[in-house]
Image (cartoon, coloured by chain):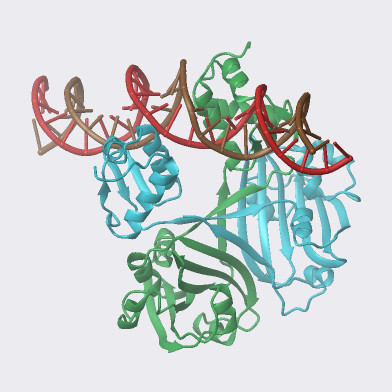
Chain colours: A cyan, B green, C red, D brown
Amino acid sequence: MSTPDINSWQSVQDEVLRRIHNRIWKPGAQIPNETDLAKEFNCGRTTVNRALRELAESGILERKRKSGTRVALHPVSRAVIAVQIVRREIEERGASYGYALIDRTVDTPPHAVTFAMELAQGEEMLHVRAVHLADGVPYALEDRWICLRTVPQARDYDFAQKSANEWLLENVPYNRATLSILATPASAFEQEYLAVSDKASILHVERATWRDKGPVTFVTISYQPGHRIISTTTS
Amino acid sequence: MSTPDINSWQSVQDEVLRRIHNRIWKPGAQIPNETDLAKEFNCGRTTVNRALRELAESGILERKRKSGTRVALHPVSRAVIAVQIVRREIEERGASYGYALIDRTVDTPPHAVTFAMELAQGEEMLHVRAVHLADGVPYALEDRWICLRTVPQARDYDFAQKSANEWLLENVPYNRATLSILATPASAFEQEYLAVSDKASILHVERATWRDKGPVTFVTISYQPGHRIISTTTS
DNA sequence: ATTCTCGTTATGTGCAGACATAAAGAAAAT
DNA sequence: ATTTTCTTTATGTCTGCACATAACGAGAAT
């Protein structure tokens, strides 16, 4: 009522966040409904809706029809990490990009790969391994399996000039993806191509993608020791 | 024109995605403006706007006033990972949760910590170390520095029963956070409390949080070898 | 040629009003 | 007591319309 006009969805969001941070609305507590807030802030319900919807999407509020809106008890904050082609990752660091194909074979993938791609075993796939260089130094290894059933045109591409990473992104769209981050000691293969010792600890990013229901590719990117994946969360 | 009515923002989004996936609208190409799409789909411009706005937020489209909307050339897909308290992480795996404080001291933090918290060196902070257990087995270590200037009430809390992880989340709100993921070989401290060998590779999640302009805390969570951080991306 | 001004254009946002939909809770039927 | 049906309520969404705002580009002024 006494609140001066807050009539942009941004300012509504700011005010709601302020009240949550100042414990005016405590965790678990119910907040007024959209209509009442709109009246208080002297703005449209649509505006309040947008502000609250975004906060719900980011996990700060929990909303349910009829029940109303409450402050999340255990705010699950969402950290967003950008997944992009390795070349751009390197170029954004101001380094020059280099690429070298290690090998390219058609083979039966190991169980871990078929499992991650939600496939039965036994199907032959294209196996491509390559190294990405930053200023001439190994930056990351790419170990990729491509499903030839979904992506038959990969059989005719040699991946000598352009990495599978880029070729796929440009030529094969996907709908669904999973991503998994883990750490392991350097394998013999990683020791050789990243030029590190057997004591090195390697950060892996595994990524599987699908086009509609067809599996596209499964890739493991192994980074040079010391690599960090960074994310800045908002709100 | 000939398109049958597509009059929910979801269906507009689906249709736009279909056209992108089917290369009807190629990467880098400009797509019709909102008004024209609204006419074609026989829906309101607001509806088209919402559909396109979300696609732009997720990195599939790039929008600029006056210039219009184009399909992103290098789609930076955003993987979202949920950051929540360790207890819930363990409980969601169906394991019983245990917690043990290792030590709690007031000390001057090392450079790496003051750097991550964007602080000058020399200020004393509260240093809390603890282990989180899943079914009685060490699951993750928590190594945390709390800024006593921003969070003076932490000085009087002993963290013997409740982890700093939970206590802070319940008692000290924050506005801004950074998150960084990396892998290192197990330190002596980690070897002891996670009960692993010196060859183990540890996945670390480092997180710094701020309340307005005041630094709140900097924490490193070190996970048991083999731990994975998983994210499922949409669209 | 360079700088400035200004109209044009596409997106960004706000509003009121309407209807859709999930879900809780009351009332009725069994 | 249990199940079914309904009413009510708060959120979810669509619409048309309006105005705000960024930014490109044409044309004027220098």
- Give the side of residue B182 with respect to residue B176, left or right: right
Q: Quadrant of the C terminus of chain B?
A: top right
Residue located at (71% from left, 57% from top): A220
Residue A19: x %, y % from top left = 32, 54
Residue located at (79% from left, 54% from top): A87
Judging depth in this view, the residue of B133 and A26 nearest the camera is: A26
- Give the side of residue B20 with respect to residue A107, left or right: left
A6, above or below B105, in the image: above
- Give the side of residue C15 with respect to residue B122, left or right: left
C23, above or below B198, in the image: above
B113, above or below C8, in the image: below
- Give the side of residue B117 with respect to residue A104, left or right: left
Residue A153: x %, y % from top left = 83, 36
Judging depth in this view, the residue of B190 and A82 nearest the camera is: A82
Residue B34: x %, y % from top left = 60, 25
Q: Quadrant of the N terminus of chain B?
A: top right
Residue located at (87% from left, 52% from top): A104
Residue B90: x %, y % from top left = 43, 64
